[in-house]
Amino acid sequence: MSLGIGTSLAYLAAAVLFIFGIRILRSPMTARAGNLIAAVGMLVACVATLLEFKGDVYTLLLIAGVVVAGSVVGGVMATRVPMTSMPQFVAAFNGVGGGAAALISFSELYKLSQLPLPEQNFVILLSILFGILIGGVSFSGSAVAFSKLEEIAFEGSVTFPIQKVVNALMFLVAVAAGVNVLIGGPMPVASAAVVLGVSLLLGVLLVIPIGGADMPIVISLLNAFTGLAAAASGFSLGNTVLIIAGALVGASGTILTYLMSAALGRPLSKILFGAVAAAGQKEAEAHDKPVTSGDPENVGSMLANEADSVIFIPGYGLAVAQAQSAMADLMRTLEGQGKDVKFAIHPVAGRMPGHMNVLLAEARVPASKLVDLDDINDQFAETDAVIIVGANDVVNPTAREDGDSPIAGMPILNADHARRVVFVKRSLSPGFAGIDNPLFYDQDRTTMLFSDAKDGLEGVTQAVKNQG
């Protein structure tokens, strides 16, 4: 068997592993195995590519050194990053992939520009320019997303006058520079550099207007961009497995982006170009309204004596407080007293797709107890108590009642239909959409437990045990 045939078979095996790994990522119970299988596929592809590479020993050692260094850095980061920072971690890694694809495409264009014009392939040039543009947008956009999530810069929605006009003009500049390359105009490498520079600026301008509530969709879309850029660079390199891997990432990211924008009840165009900026009520204004507050003993007594069915609704505040284990302990305590307990998972809760699922899986909450919005919303009306921890926008009735609200039309969890509602929050501050939640002030139904999520849940668990 020749090396070429062996490499092709290795690429085919890698592609099968990619597809199968993604397929079983759909379930939390098999997601870890799916991730491992896809990683093995990538290892097979990398080894096969290196075996096919016809380079000198120095170049091979350089490649090996870079691979080892990158693996060490990535491994250390992955083990040390807390779950609360996982969205930032995903955004950063995604941006690195997009930047790498853009640089690979740029280097291939430089090589191609050295050939006489008749020998240059128009389709390859087009794919190279596409890789530069999309990869650059992914890199800088992911950097901005990281900065927003880490609260380093660009917090909230950052806008300026004629922003859409500026974006359109920048895109036209990139198109003009790309056309100059395609028609064999002067200074093709400089034109490609213009495309790269404009793409980096566009990535910043496209992401800075988007608020924190929409960050899961932005991360998903940028992930799709990175996949498309990788596929384009694979096409220019003639690397089959890179095309397959990039296409899989691009397709899955695109589908996920569509599903999540549908979950928000707003078209993707409005999320990206609408510059949704919440008016944002001040916390001092919210404190002027009366609320019913309680302590862990009050809440524990209610759960132990009045509630046969309980639904937990986790949000980003749960991740910040690292309270997933405390929530799982309360679940087990309630189940020990014969209560029916479920978890309602909103598709955009947290800062990335599946954020709450990952947190609760880490706390060993059975995947069968995690119920999606569409499957649980009809059950709230028959539920005795809802415990909302660190969530606001995903249970805000304003989405149904106020057509001018920044979250208008977004499907929400019908927590306000339950008999009793408990919010575990530090204060009455609004969520990332910046709007107040009228459910806070339903004094007949809602109890506000003002506490750190972990301390509050641990106190409620002890109170429930005391009642038992």
Image (tube, rainbow, N blue to C red):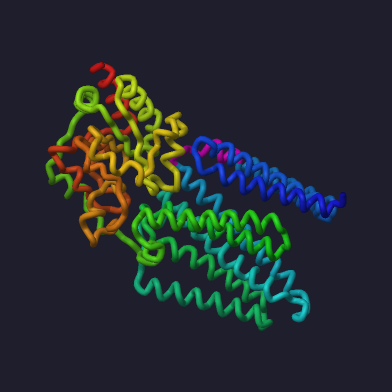
Asked if residue 184 lies left or right of residue 280, the reply is: right
Rendering coords of residue 103 (x, y %): 64, 62
Q: Residue at x 44, y 34 (%)?
A: 367
Kindly tell me whether residue 450 is visible in this rendering: no
Q: Magenta: predominant secondary structure element?
A: helix
Foreground residue, 195 or 336?
336
Residue 390 occupies quadrant: top left
> Magenta includes 439?
no
Residue 121 lies, with reference to residue 92, above or below; the image says below
Residue 393 lies, with reference to residue 168, above or below; the image says above
Rendering coords of residue 188 (x, y %): 67, 77
Q: Residue furthest right?
A: 1
> Magenta includes 76?
yes
Asked if residue 440 lies left or right of residue 49, the reply is: left
Residue 164 occupies quadrant: bottom left
Kindly tell me whether residue 151 is visible in this rendering: yes
Q: Specify start and end residues of the magenta stretch as a single range.
A: 75-84
Asked if residue 96 lies left or right of residue 318, the reply is: right
Foreground residue, 288 or 54?
54
Rendering coords of residue 351 (x, y %): 41, 47
Asked if residue 84 lies left or right of residue 402, the reply is: right
Residue 30 occupies quadrant: top right
Count of numbered circles on the image:
0
Q: Residue at x 56, y 58 (%)?
A: 250
Rendering coords of residue 465 (x, y %): 28, 18
Q: Residue at x 77, y 75 (%)?
A: 115
Residue 185 lies, with reference to residue 361, above or below; the image says below
Which quarter of the rendering shows the C terminus? top left
